[in-house]
Image (spheres, rainbow, N blue to C red):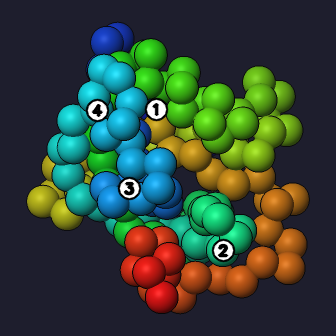
């Protein structure tokens, strides 16, 4: 199935882990500052990888997150942070998905999906909310 691609100059990212507001890698620390546009949930399973989570897309459970407007410079920094590789062999795989926000708007978003090889033996985070889980 082909993935949507962003319009020129327009970028959104769905963040679900340490990049969320209040997380240890809060996306607001990047420059130029990303602009939060909505809260959202995606179908997926969230795994506890220790200091951070990883999401596998699809299924019947939901993962909580936030959508931010970003520029290409921030996207490049996120690619480095998430260890994205051109051949999809990195820690995370970069995906483009249509994400429906809590307010009903839809955005074509960059989503970082954990490489399937990284979740073996890892616990699922019930409720799909990394921030709530990390505060326990």
- Disc 2 to disc 4, C-alpha distance: 26 Å
Q: Name the residue under label 4.
A: 34
Specify which label sits upstream in the sequence, 3 or 2. 3
Of labels 2 and 1, the one closer to you: 2
Specify which label sits upstream in the sequence, 4 or 1. 1
Q: Residue 48 carries which label?
A: 2
Q: Name the residue under label 1.
A: 4
Specify which label sits upstream in the sequence, 3 or 4. 3
Name which residue lies at 58% across and 46% down.
112
Q: Which of 60 and 110 is in front in this view?
A: 110
- Disc 3 to disc 2, C-alpha distance: 15 Å
Q: In which quarter of the image is residue 63?
A: bottom left
Question: Image height check: is 11 above or below 42?
Answer: above
- Disc 3 to disc 4, C-alpha distance: 11 Å
Name which residue lies at 48% across and 25% down.
75
Question: Image height check: is 92 above or below 9?
Answer: below
Specify which label sits upstream in the sequence, 2 or 1. 1
For the residues bearing labels 4 and 1, Cβ distance under 8 angstroms? no
Label 4's element? loop
For the residues bearing labels 3 and 4, Cβ distance under 8 angstroms? no
For the residues bearing labels 3 and 1, Cβ distance under 8 angstroms? no
Q: Name the residue under label 3.
A: 20
- Disc 4 to disc 1, C-alpha distance: 21 Å
Name which residue lies at 60% across and 30% down.
79
């Amino acid at each position: 199935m082909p993935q949507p691609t962003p319009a020129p100059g327009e970028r959104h990212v769905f963040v679900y882990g340490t990049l969320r507001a209040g997380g240890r890698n809060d996306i607001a620390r990047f420059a130029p500052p990303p602009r939060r546009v909505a809260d959202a949930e995606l179908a997926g399973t969230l795994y506890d990888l220790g200091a951070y989570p990883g999401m596998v897309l699809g299924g019947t459970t939901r993962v909580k997150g936030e959508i931010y407007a970003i520029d290409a410079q921030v996207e490049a920094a996120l690619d480095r942070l998430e260890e994205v590789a051109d051949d999809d062999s990195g820690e995370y795989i970069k995906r483009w998905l249509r994400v429906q926000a809590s307010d009903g708007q839809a955005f074509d978003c960059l989503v970082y999906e954990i490489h399937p090889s990284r979740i073996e033996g890892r616990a699922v985070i019930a409720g799909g909310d990394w921030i709530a889980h990390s505060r326990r």
